[in-house]
Image (cartoon, coloured by chain):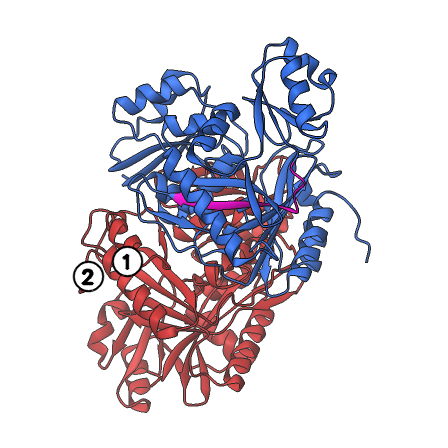
Chain colours: A blue, B red
Amino acid sequence: MKSNVVAVIGGGQLARMMQQAAGPLDVRLRALVEAADGATAQVVPESFVGDPSDEEAVRALLAADGASRLALTFEHEHQDTDLLQRLAAEGVSVQPPPDALLYARDKLKMRERLSALGAPVPDWAIISSASDLDEFLAGHDGEAIVKTARGGYDGKGVRLVTDVEDIADWLAGDIELIAEEKVPFDMEVAALLARRPSGEMRHWELTQTIQEDGVCAVAIAPAPEVSGELRAEARRIAELIAEGLGVTGVLAVEMFVTGSRLLVNELAMRPHNSGHWTIEGATTSQFEQHLRAVLDLPLGATGMRAPHAVMTNVLGSELSDPAEAYPEVMAHLSEVKVHLYGKGVRPGRKLGHVSAIGDDLAVLTERTAAAAALLRGERRDK
Amino acid sequence: MKSNVVAVIGGGQLARMMQQAAGPLDVRLRALVEAADGATAQVVPESFVGDPSDEEAVRALLAADGASRLALTFEHEHQDTDLLQRLAAEGVSVQPPPDALLYARDKLKMRERLSALGAPVPDWAIISSASDLDEFLAGHDGEAIVKTARGGYDGKGVRLVTDVEDIADWLAGDIELIAEEKVPFDMEVAALLARRPSGEMRHWELTQTIQEDGVCAVAIAPAPEVSGELRAEARRIAELIAEGLGVTGVLAVEMFVTGSRLLVNELAMRPHNSGHWTIEGATTSQFEQHLRAVLDLPLGATGMRAPHAVMTNVLGSELSDPAEAYPEVMAHLSEVKVHLYGKGVRPGRKLGHVSAIGDDLAVLTERTAAAAALLRGERRDK
C-alpha cells in the first residue's frame, strides 16, 4: 500500500525517467503506454497498453487502491481535453490542469494567451490564406517561420517559408497555421521551473540549447555568457507564464536570446529535453520535481552540484544497439553518465543522452560529444 | 533486445536499487525474489518468485534471449554454492564467483583465509566447546565477540560474551562458532571498491559507519579525521582481499580503526549499506558500478560530487508508511534525498535511507538525522 501514486499517460523516455525518480521516493507509477515493450513498459511493472483518448483505459489507470495522494499527468501535450476536463470535474487531480495543457498543445491559443499576458513573443499572425502569408512576408523581409497550430514537435509541423508554395499543402488541408518572424537569435535558451497546484515554484539554472534540424542536440547549464539581468528576466517570464496559464508540474519555456532581449518560442508542460542535465547536475532532477509537483508535495532544492553541466543527445545510431559501444565509452569516458531509453534504432531517433558535470565546460562538452558519437556508432579519432 | 542482462537473486532493497541504476544504462534486470509485492518486484517487471536453491528457478532466471552479456549476481551471500558452481562450470558468468562468495557466507573460512593472506584481523579462535571459550576469554580480559560462522547479518548471530552460559544454546545446537577479541576501536570504517573479472578495480572514499545495535545507522564519507596513511592502508587491505579471494562486483570491507591500526571485521560481496551515499555523492554509484563490474564492463569514475556525504538509515517507523512524513520532510529539508524501499513497517526494519551532500559536514549530519527522524514518525522539535 503506497501513499503516493502517479498515473502517467505516455510510454516513452520521459515516463521511463519519471520511474527512475519514482523508485527512490517509493512513488507508485502507473503508465498508459503505446506498446508493451516500449521505453516505459520495460521499467514500469504497472504499464497498461491503451489509447490516451480511451476513457475506460484512462479510468483503469486511475483505479489505484489505497493511495492518499493520486495525480494524473502526461509525458506529452497531445491529450483529449474533454476527457481530462470531465475527470477533473469529478475530483481527479489532473496535473497540469486541462485548461493549461491546451496552451502547450495549440500554438495559436498559446500565442494569443502569451500576447495577452504581456510575455515577449516574436511577431506573429494567423495564416488562413495565401494573402495572409504574402502580407506577413512583406512585413518581414520575405521570410517567416510557419507552424501548424497543433501536432508539431521536434521540428515537425514547422517550416521556414519564403513563398506561399512552401505551405500549399497545409493551406489546401485547411490546417490552422500561424506565421512568426524569423528571429535572428544569438542563442536559444530554456527556462525550466516546477510549480505546485498550491503555487510554490522552484527554478533551475537557465539552460542553453543547441538545436540541429529542429531537435535539441546539446544543453548547457548554466547558459554561458548570459547576463544576470537576462537570467532574472527569463525567470520572470517563466513565472509569468506558469502563473498566467495555471501550469503545474515542470514547465519549460524555450526562448530566443537576441541582443539583450528574450522572445518566447515554445512551451512544454512536462519534463523537457533541455532539463535532462538535472538528473546528475541538480540536487533535485526535473523528473523527481515533476512527481513532487503533481502530487502537490513540497519542491526540492534545485541548486547545481557542479559549476557546469552538459547534456548531449544520442540521435540515431549505426549500431544495432547503442549499448554495443559501452566497452569503449566506459573505458575512455568514465566520468560521463550514459542514459539509453531502450528504444529500437531508427535514423535520427532520440535513443538516449549522455551527461557530465564538473568545473571545465570545454572538457565536459568534448567528453559528452565523444560519448554520444561512440553510442551513435562513430569511431573514435584518437 | 537488450545487449546487457543481469540476473539477480534477491528481492530486497539492494536489488531494488540495482534497478535504479539499470534503467539509465538500459541493462535488463531479472530478479528471483521472495515475494511478488516485495521491494524489488515493485520496480522490476521481470521479477520471478522462487527459492534461490531451486535449480529450475535459477535456470529460468538465466533464460534471457538475445543478451550479448549476461551475469548472475546476488544481493546477499546466502547462496547454494554447489548450484552456483555447476552453473559456472557450464559457462554461466556467476559474479562474484561461488568460490569467493563462500568467504562472505562463512565467517570461519573468511577468518582463516584472511589470516593466510596476511590481512590484519582481530585475534580469533574456533569455538567447539565450553573449554575453547574459557581459554579464549582467559586470554582476552574475560570478554569475546562470538559469532556463528554462517547465517549472521545486521547484528544477528553475533553476541558479546563473558560466560559460557551466553552461548550455551549455540554450543548445544552444534553450530560452528568463532570467538574474536572485542576490539576497543576508535571508529568503524568501510573500504568500498568494485572489481571486474578482468581485474580492474576502483575505490570510493573510505567511509565511517556508525552502528546502533549491530546495524549501520549512519555513514559519512570521507571518514573524518582519518589520516592519508590510514586511508591508503585501507585501500591496500581491500585490494589484497579482493584479489586474494577473487571477488568481483562491489566489495565492502568493514574495519575497526584502533589507534593507527586497521583490523578487518566483516566482508560483503555486493552493494553495501555503507555505500548508499554513492548514489548522490559519487560520479558512479555502487549500484551502477556493481552492474558494470559483474558484466565485465569498464568501471566508472568514483570521485565525490561534494566534499562530504552523509547517509542516515530509516530504521522502523511509528507511521504506517514513512512517506506520510513527506510534506514535512520535503518542506523543511529540501536538500535531503529520500530513499524508501517499499517495505512494510516493522520495528527496527530498514525501511529506507536519506542522504545529503555538501560542504558542511555538521549541517549534513543534522539534516539527515532530522529527515530520518521525521520518516520514523518522530516530531520536529523546531
Picture quadrant where residue B315 is located: bottom left
Q: Viewer-proximal residue, B154 or A355?
A: A355
**Marking on residue B296:** none
Question: Is residue A186 within the magenta segment?
Answer: yes
Residue A124 picture quarter: top right
Q: State the quadrant of the C terminus of chain A.
A: bottom right
Quadrant in the picture for the N terminus of chain A: top left
Q: Which residue lies furthest to the right in this view?
A: A381
Q: Give the range drawn in magenta.
A: A183-194
Task: Tell which tag, 2 or 1, sits nearer the viewer.
Answer: 1
Front residue of this view, candidates B351 and B89: B351
Q: Residue A376 placed where, x, y %?
A: 72, 42
Q: Which chain carries label 1?
A: B
Is residue A351 visible to us here?
A: yes
Q: Name the residue under label 1.
A: B332
User: Looking at the image, do the residues carrying marks 2 and 1 touch, with CB atoms under 8 Å apart?
Assistant: yes
From the top left corner, tell me how far across and down residue A4 is, in percent.
30, 40
Q: Is residue B88 left or right of residue B262?
A: right
Q: Can I make out residue B155 in this image?
A: no
Looking at the image, is mark 2 or mark 1 earlier in the sequence?
1
Indicate the secondary structure of the residue bearing disc 2. loop
Decide if residue B131 is on the left or right side of residue B240.
left
Q: Is residue A261 left or right of residue A182?
A: left
Mark 2 residue crowding within 10 angstroms, few (<14) / some (14–19) / many (20+): few
Q: Residue at x 75, y 43 (%)?
A: A377
Quadrant for residue B240, please give it: bottom right
Give the residue type that dot 2 points to: Arg
Q: Which mark is residue B380?
A: 2
Residue B53: give x, y in percent of width and height: 44, 47
